[in-house]
Amino acid sequence: KEGAVKLEKHIPSFAEMRLFSKALGPQLLFSMLKNVCYLMLQSVATQFSTATCAAHQALWSVWAVLSFCPTPLEQAAQVFLPSYLVTAQEEEENAKRSTPPVFSKAREFSKTLGGLSAGAGALLAAMAAVSTLFPGALASDPSL
């Protein structure tokens, strides 16, 4: 068919695997550390009394949902930032050759992403704080 994508079997070369592992390493480390933090929080909560642990679980459910809201920003950084950094390296090489450097997309993207992340963090923190003001919405047991 015209316009159809043809799939071919391909065994990746060492260079391709090295490039893939460069991108995979930080993501794997970040995900593992994030999950270890979740595990530690839940482990500490099990040391509390039953009612306190139940109250923690109610608030944990809100926090767990809110913690996945910034994932699109994380994915945007993983997709766009590497290509912008390569552009920045090329600009640096151009500067060494006395040619005027081109506008750095990496710096601008980092500023934009930082601003969006700070705004999202503040909004999500406010939502989490507001959820503690209405404990009846999280659990029907008044002792929690």
Image (cartoon, rainbow, N blue to C red):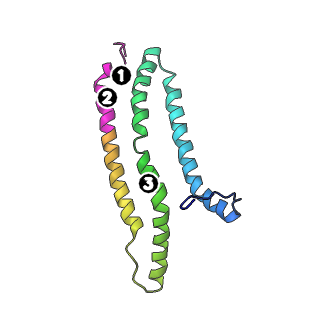
Residue picked out by circle 1 = 138
Residue bearing mark 2:
131
Q: In whole angstroms, how far apart are the C-alphas of marks 3 and 1?
A: 32 Å
Amino acid type of the residue tagged 3 in the rendering: Ala
Picture quadrant where residue 35 is located? top right
SS class, disc 2: helix
Q: Are marks 2 and 1 in contact (CB under 8 Å)?
A: yes
Main SS category, magenta section: helix
Q: Amino acid at mark 1?
A: Leu
Q: Nearer the viewer, residue 16 or 7?
A: 7
Q: In x, y percent, where is residue 13?
A: 70, 63
Q: Is residue 126 magenta?
A: yes
Q: Which residue shows up at 50% across the image and 62% down it? A: 82
Pick whichever of labels 2 and 1 is earlier in the sequence. Answer: 2
Image height of 13 relative to 136, above or below: below
Q: Is residue 3 magenta?
A: no
Quick one: label 2, few (<14), some, or many (20+) residues within 10 Å? some
Q: Which residues are drawn in magenta?
A: 125-144
Q: Residue furthest front?
A: 1
Nearer to us: label 3 or label 2: 3
Q: Is residue 128 left or right of residue 43?
A: left
Q: Earlier in the sequence, mark 3 or mark 1?
A: 3
| Helix, strand or loop under label 3 | helix
Amino acid under label 2? Ser
State the image coordinates of residue 134 (x, y, percent, origin top left).
29, 23
Give how far apart the Cα atoms at labels 3 and 2 are: 28 Å
Residue at numbered disc 3: 76
